[in-house]
Image (tube, rainbow, N blue to C red):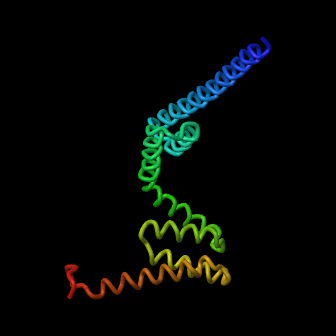
Amino acid sequence: EYIKSLRRHAGRVVAAADDEDARKVRKKAMAAESACQKGVMAMERGRYAYAVDSFSRALEATPQSAEYYARLGWAMYKLVTETRPSLEDAKAKLLRAIVIADDKVEYRMWLAQVLRDLGDEEGALKQYLKVQELDPRNDEAIRQARYTNQALEKKRESEKGRSLFGFKK
């Protein structure tokens, strides 16, 4: 009788543990779905950074969801492509900051990165050189100036061997 009682009790304990595990799984799934819905609404409103955050939270709760991976990937793409034109705005704001405080090394480093992203290697190089002038020990500016200068020289070399119409001579 005692053994039967233990088995019944053990069965109830296992069932209770299973119920608790099931509750945790349901709670995680509901949190993931809620985060996903917030992400979908953010996408509809063009709030891509918030959508990326929401879909990331959904994936933390449900890492095997193909839908959440796909939505996160699309939100990341939209975040990058939709905000790309704002690089010109960023450049304008950084230039304005430098007019106000032209001795700030950090502002010039940021501007140089924006200029590089916009394809203005020469403008970026000028900023890196100015940073070196302001702070001769700035290793990052020295390194970036060297890389940028090498890229410019390589570009000039490749253009040197071309005719007026872009064909190799």
Which of the two residues, 103 or 131, is positioned nearer the viewer here? 131
- Counting from the top left corner in percent of width and height, residue 130 is at 58, 80
Percent of width and height locating residue 36:
51, 34
Residue at 43 percent across and 47 percent down: it is 78
In this orientation, which residue lies closer to the viewer: 128 or 147? 147
Residue sitting farthest toward the top: 1
Q: Residue at x 52, y 44 (%)?
A: 52
Q: Is residue 54 above or below residue 5?
A: below
> Where residue 128 appears, x then y in whole percent?
56, 78
Q: Quadrant of the image for the C terminus?
A: bottom left
**Seen in the image, is 2 located left or right of residue 159?**
right
Residue at 43% in and 42% down: 70
Relative to 149, say whether 86 is above or below. Answer: above
Quarter placement of the N terminus:
top right
Q: Residue 137: which quarter of the image? A: bottom right
The percent coordinates of residue 100 (x first, y second) are 63, 67
